[in-house]
């Protein structure tokens, strides 16, 4: 049975209401960005369209089974996406974190209850080091597929590189080490557990945080993923690369049949030099009308009854 997992950084999916406990005033109707309901719904339906197109092609097409989403504000955005957007008939349910992130951004996981049954889930809090701002929780979900395969899925959005790669790398290493603790706990009970880690690591495949996870038997199955045009999920200073990754435990890697970057033409913007880049929502403070500055990763696995 085919099983599709998607990872996607939505780039600032805020609703239009102020949360007094968070620094979200940048994304309000009366802010400089003029984040209005019409712009919000345009973005929301754009994200729904992205998810829809990650479902595949041909007669066997269907919506993805699991979608790990990053940079989503709250339940309001997830309820709107699952119940009011163009994928509302897909029957998705979701779980998400409520992190201490100052800007109020969290991670969430959509799942199709017909193909994946959630057994339990919880957030893993990251204790910030001195001088570090509170960061996003890791979302852990344990569930079972229709083929009775148990999956342990982590959705992660590691601390950004703001302040410089070298200065902020210890924060991302700390997240990787916390992930390793969680992996060890699972393997202490189930040695050959099927584990998936999906998210924006804010690091490239050759950085230390990814290497630490690789040393724990986690394989980066999207390391060589490409799209029709895109050679990474993110473009910085004219160069394609990937801050987004999907890693799976070694026993599960053999079930991966395809690993791609979904880069439909409408998800890309043309550059003056003739190249392309992700069609993002804002260019600086100016509204651009796109969906995200990241492209989604898609892996397709095969499970047997």
Image: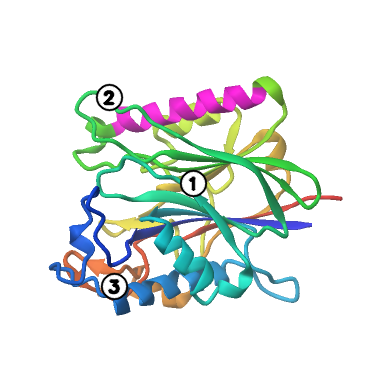
| Picture layout, residue 127 above or below residue 112 | above
**Is residue 263 something one can see in this rendering?**
no
Left or right: 117 in relation to 45: right
Judging by the rendered image, the residue that carries numbered circle 2 is 129
Query: How many numbered marks appear?
Result: 3
The residue sitting at 43% across, 73% down in the picture is 46
Measure the alpha-carbon separation of dots 3 and 1: 25 Å
Judging by the rendered image, the residue that carries numbered circle 3 is 271
Name the residue at the right extreme.
305
The residue sitting at 37% across, 56% down in the picture is 234
Location of residue 41 by image quarter: bottom left
Left or right: 184 in relation to 135: right
The magenta segment is 169-187
Judging by the rendered image, the residue that carries numbered circle 1 is 245
| Picture layout, residue 7 above or below residue 61 | above
In the image, 9 versus 250, the foreground residue is 9
Q: Is residue 185 magenta?
A: yes
**Secondary structure predominantly adopted by residues drawn in magenta:** helix
């Amino acid at each position: 049975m085919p099983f599709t997992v998607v990872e996607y950084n939505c780039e600032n999916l805020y609703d239009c209401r102020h949360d007094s406990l968070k620094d979200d005033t940048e994304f309000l109707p009366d802010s400089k960005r003029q984040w209005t309901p019409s712009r919000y719904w345009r973005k929301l339906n754009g994200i729904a369209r992205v998810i829809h197109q990650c479902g595949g092609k041909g007669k066997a097409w269907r919506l993805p089974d699991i979608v790990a989403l990053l940079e989503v504000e709250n339940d309001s955005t997830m309820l709107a996406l699952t119940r009011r957007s163009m994928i509302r008939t897909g029957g998705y349910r979701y779980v998400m974190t409520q992190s201490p992130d100052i800007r109020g951004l969290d991670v969430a996981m959509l799942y199709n209850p017909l193909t994946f049954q959630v057994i339990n889930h919880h957030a893993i809090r990251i204790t910030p080091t001195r001088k570090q701002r509170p960061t996003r929780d890791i979302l852990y979900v344990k569930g079972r597929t229709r083929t009775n395969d148990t999956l342990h899925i982590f959705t992660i959005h590691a601390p950004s590189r703001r302040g410089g790669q070298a200065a902020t790398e210890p924060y991302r290493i700390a997240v990787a080490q916390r992930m390793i603790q969680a992996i060890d706990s699972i393997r202490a009970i189930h040695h050959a557990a099927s584990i998936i880690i999906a998210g924006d690591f804010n690091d490239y495949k050759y950085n230390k945080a990814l290497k630490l996870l690789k040393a724990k038997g986690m394989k980066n199955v999207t390391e060589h993923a490409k799209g029709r045009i895109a050679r990474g999920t993110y473009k910085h200073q004219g160069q394609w690369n990937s801050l987004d990754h999907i890693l799976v435990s070694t026993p599960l890697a053999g079930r991966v049949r395809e690993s791609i970057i979904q880069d439909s033409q409408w998800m890309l913007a043309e550059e003056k030099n003739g190249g392309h880049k992700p069609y993002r929502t804002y260019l600086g403070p100016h509204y651009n009308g796109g969906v995200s500055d990241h492209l989604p990763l898609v892996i397709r696995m095969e499970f047997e009854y």
